[in-house]
Amino acid sequence: MKPAAVAFFPKRRSKKKLSKETMQGIASLMNSGFSLQQTLTILDDPASKLVFDEIRARLESGEAISDFLCEYTPAAYARYLSGFLMYMPFHNALALSLSIVDTDDRNQNELLKGLLYPVLMMVGMLGASALFSLTILPAMISLLEGFQLEDPSYGILKTAIPAAALTILILLAAAAVIFMISIRQKNIVSSYCFLLRFLKDSLPVQIASRNFTRFFLECVRQKLSTIQCMDILMHLPGRPVVSYIARMLDQEMRKGSSLEDAVHTNLLESSLSRFMKTAIYSSDCEKMLEGYLEMTKARTETQIRRFSRTVQFVSYLLIGVMIVLMYRLLLMPMNMMQRI
């Protein structure tokens, strides 16, 4: 009776996940030579006890850690871990997944910090300009008309400022909608191919090339062959552009082309093609690829700074125009009273 009950009512698995710090500890200890059982014993604490007990039970029942570890890791790590486990020991796959997610988070924070603030500032200034022209400016014009100080230019500004602000806001909203549609999983590869055709070395192409290099470098560090690297990248979850680039390169190499010839295509930005060509013949391929990543990081930071300064300059210019306009409107009645 008991086996039947177990079959119909299997033991429920814990929904609790391993923390990032615990996963880093597991990878670090196992890379230092500790066995999995020793690692679980060393890291055992009240917060992770429930998960560790389940892992021990499943190991004792004969399951391999690589078959179920993804169930106990957060989704951000599990999507990479599931693919890496097919090609390398699980502690190496875990360490690689942790490194990739950490780098992803760092890159996203840098982009948000560099781009989001100036864009929000611009939107705020446009909104303030429209609000000023729709509320304060009409009241000031009515006041001037009461003093018989009509000025046609202010009437034009009352119409032109909100119209210009609204037009720019609509353009920004349209650009945001196009961007969101373009980066959807089913559209992002087509969008990338479009950029390659018309804007080969644009910022999105640079970012995609940088991501491909980052993943390729991590595979090279694991001493995998080029074919294995491409196989991993072709099936990389959540990275359709990286997978597309790897698939195209893999097709070229399977046709008989060398990696040197395969990378010299329109799939990557120009500088990466040159870097890869040099790295193939270099005695230290890892160092060359790391150099490319450092170069692209510095270049991206420069581009973000330039964009941020431009947007901030325009925003401050709008603030200055509104202040000067308000100042002139406020002084006109006073100047009239002085003439009287």
Image: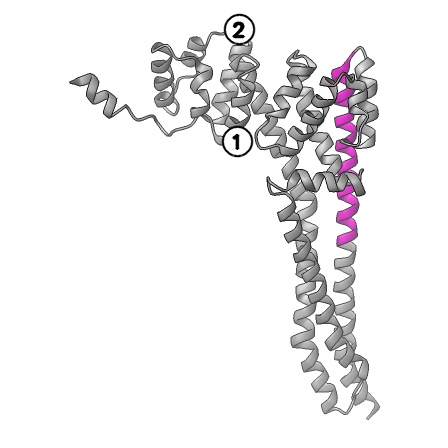
Mark 1 residue type: Ala
Vertical side of 169 occupied by 60: above or below: above
Q: Residue at x 38, y 29 (%)?
A: 16
Determine the residue positioned at 35% across, 19% down.
54
Q: Is residue 14 magenta?
A: no
Q: Which mark is residue 33?
A: 2
- What secondary structure is the magenta-colored segment mainly? helix
Which residue is depicted at the point 72% across and 83% down?
141
Residue matched to label 1 = 76
Q: Is residue 285 left or right of residue 16?
A: right
In three-dimensional space, the C-alpha distance between marks 1 and 2, rounded to whole angstroms, equals 26 Å
- Label 2 sits on a secondary structure element that is loop
Furthest-front residue in this view: 255
Residue 301, compared with residue 133, is above or below; it is: above
Q: Quadrant of residue 329?
A: bottom right
Q: Nearer the viewer, residue 110 or 208?
A: 208
User: Residue 310 at what x, y percent from top left?
Assistant: 79, 51
> Considering the numbered disc 1 on the image, is that residue within a helix, a strand or a loop?
helix
Q: Is residue 199 visible?
A: no
Residue density around tag 2, few if under 14, some if 14–19, many if 20 or more, within 10 Å: few
Q: Is residue 146 above or below residue 202?
A: below
Residue 70, given in percent of the width and then of the height, sits at 46, 23
In the rendered image, the quadrant that contains the N terminus is top left
Q: Amino acid at mark 2?
A: Gly
User: From where the camera sits, is residue 24 visible?
Assistant: yes
Magenta residues? 284-311
Q: Name which quarter of the figure residue 188 lies in.
A: top right
